[in-house]
Image (cartoon, rainbow, N blue to C red):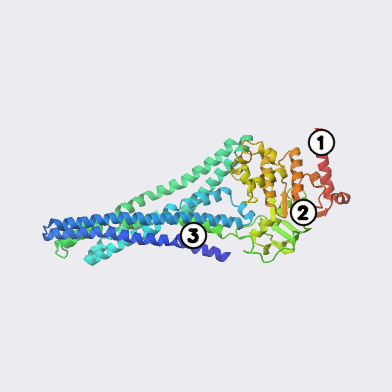
Amino acid sequence: MAEKKRTNQKKSLLSWIFTFAGEKKPMYWASVFFAVLCVACALAPYVIIADIVRKLLEGVRDWNVYLREAGITAAFWVGNAVFHMISTTLSHVATFNLLANIRKKLCDKLARVPLGAVLDLPSGTLKNILIERIDSMETTLAHIVPEWTSNLLLPLVMFVYLFHIDARMGFASLITLPIGMIASCFMMRNMTERFQNAIDKTKILNDTAVEYINGIEVIKAFGKSKSSYEKFVVAAKEGSDCYVEWMRDCIWPFTIAFVIAPSTLLAVLPIGGYFFLTGSLSAVNFITIIILSMSVIQPLLVVYSYHDDIAKAGVIFGEVGGILYMKELERPESDRKKPGDNSIELKDVRFSYHKNIEGESKKEILHGINLSLPSGSYTALVGPSGSGKSTIARLIASLWDTDSGSVEIGGINIRDLSLEEYNRRVAYVSQDNFLFDLSVRENIRLGKPEATDKEVEEIARKSGCYDFIMSLEKGFDTIVGGSGAHLSGGERQRIAIARAMMKNAPIVILDEATAYTDPENEAIIQEGVAHLVKGKTLIVIAHKLSTIQDADKIVVIKDGLVDSEGKHEELLAKGGLYKSMWEAHISSKDSGEAA
């Protein structure tokens, strides 16, 4: 991991570009080729104009000669425009594909990274990197390859040509450049710190905005609109102030650099005039040098103007690399071994949620869990909030990797199974279910993409969701909204359960899957699920102990350890934590019914 991070830091911008360019890489090379032709067409008119001046001074009076050279000049200007268009078109097509490749690779990477590592990243930061910040590189990446080539090559060729005419005047044309460079040095002071400060403030602003929008319901409900909005206002002001202060400090050096540096005639005219008067420089060469010198510095300033954009792109690629080099779940591309059945066994499992980017643990949650769940069995995990029940379920679902110990399926360590194969074997439904902004039908079909409409509707019937879905405005074709926002929490859970049942995986994990449903619908769902999971290895996490009395095994988790396990009657007979939880559950249930 350390070596990967060093590689990430050492990569140049061009290395990043060609890393992600993929099959469009030849387009960048083609854009450079046409950029060179563009430069040649831009240079030729200056040479032709100088030749026209020379012929005029020599007394050539043939109109056709000048007409022909004017036509050639026009052709070169047209060629310059055409080749520039072709070059930038190619580089833009390549760049849009490059940005798409970056996003695809990041999404693929996030799918292989432990869920905890993803959740540790603020959603605003991920959104900002995946959307705005990657998109902000488009202009830089589309122009840097062809325009750097042309704008560096043009002044170089011009300088060589000027040096060929008169070396003294070649150097004279560069006299204003050091003045501009000195001014630029003042402008570049503390740039790294300033830019990093701007990036940090922008991240804070994005995270605060996402937090404010996502929590608007709670903010209004508890009358915290003023204090919460003030937090957003402060973040917005600090985000703008850092840029304003940066620009205020740079405005004078920037102006000096970009006004004086391209003013080559400030030196060329007096120095050339002196050499002409002393007879060491001919009038033809003097006029030619005046014309050509005006094109030496300006392209260099265009190249220099990309400095900030290149620095920003480098920082963004660093952020992209930071995600791409995150520790992945340890899984092979293909299965090393095949499980014998669908039994599950946890052996001395230890786990911590809070990890840094290298995956190093900070606080242990599970302290050596040992469990054996036979194939086709029904196991319930119960215990106080924060005891580690959901953590165990997520480890079995392969959303995280254990710190030590192992999770085995059919006698095979899950680290010997590919993620693709493992995901086919396990269906996981949590309390917080996510629905995509698609129809109800398409959300259920995600469990089995090739399923027909009839199969989707049939699984909805079997899981007890059909009637409620048909009561929606457009039935199965109702769009659920972003994250299922158009539906209630209970409705989202029921669709998520139907989606998991559609998957028909041999191992099913229900983590408080009916937490938001009312008692009547909960009974319907449980009846449907019980029918659908027959013969499957079922793991249920529940706080309502009355719903798991008939489990083959109930495992009581306390403080990251197995407190006890057994059937309902056995655990009641033993007393202890389970009996206390049961009595509390019955008491609260009776109180609710009495009310």
Q: Position of residue 160 (x, y in %)?
A: 27, 65
Q: Amino acid at mark 2?
A: Gly
Q: Is residue 5 or residue 61 the one in the foreground?
A: 61
Q: Is residue 189 visible?
A: no
User: Earlier along the polypeptide chain: callout 2 or callout 3?
Assistant: 3
Q: Are marks 2 and 3 in contact (CB under 8 Å)?
A: no
Q: Residue at x 62, y 55 (%)?
A: 117
**Looking at this view, is 514 or 256 the one in front?**
514
- Which amino acid, mark 1? Ser
Task: State the mark number for residue 20.
Answer: 3
Q: Earlier in the sequence, mark 1 or mark 3?
A: 3
Question: In which quadrant will I find the C terminus?
Answer: top right
Instruction: State the count of labels.
Output: 3
Q: Nearer the viewer, residue 352 or 110?
A: 110
Give left or right: position of 556 versus 457. Answer: right
Q: Residue at x 13, y 59 (%)?
A: 57
**Which image quarter is the N terminus in?**
bottom right
Q: Nearer the viewer, residue 499 or 1?
A: 499
Q: Secondary structure at mark 1?
A: helix
Q: Which residue bears the numbered disc 2?
A: 535
Residue designated by label 1 = 591
Which residue is found at the position 17% from the left and 55% from the top?
Answer: 67
Instruction: Using the numbered discs, state the Cα–Cα distance from disc 1 to disc 2 in whole angstroms.
Output: 37 Å
Residue 453 sits in which quadrant? top right
Query: Mark 2 or mark 3: which is in front?
Result: 2
Q: Position of residue 526 (x, y in %)?
A: 76, 44
Q: Name the front one of labels 1 and 2.
A: 2
Relative to residue 138, is residue 476 drawn left or right?
Answer: right
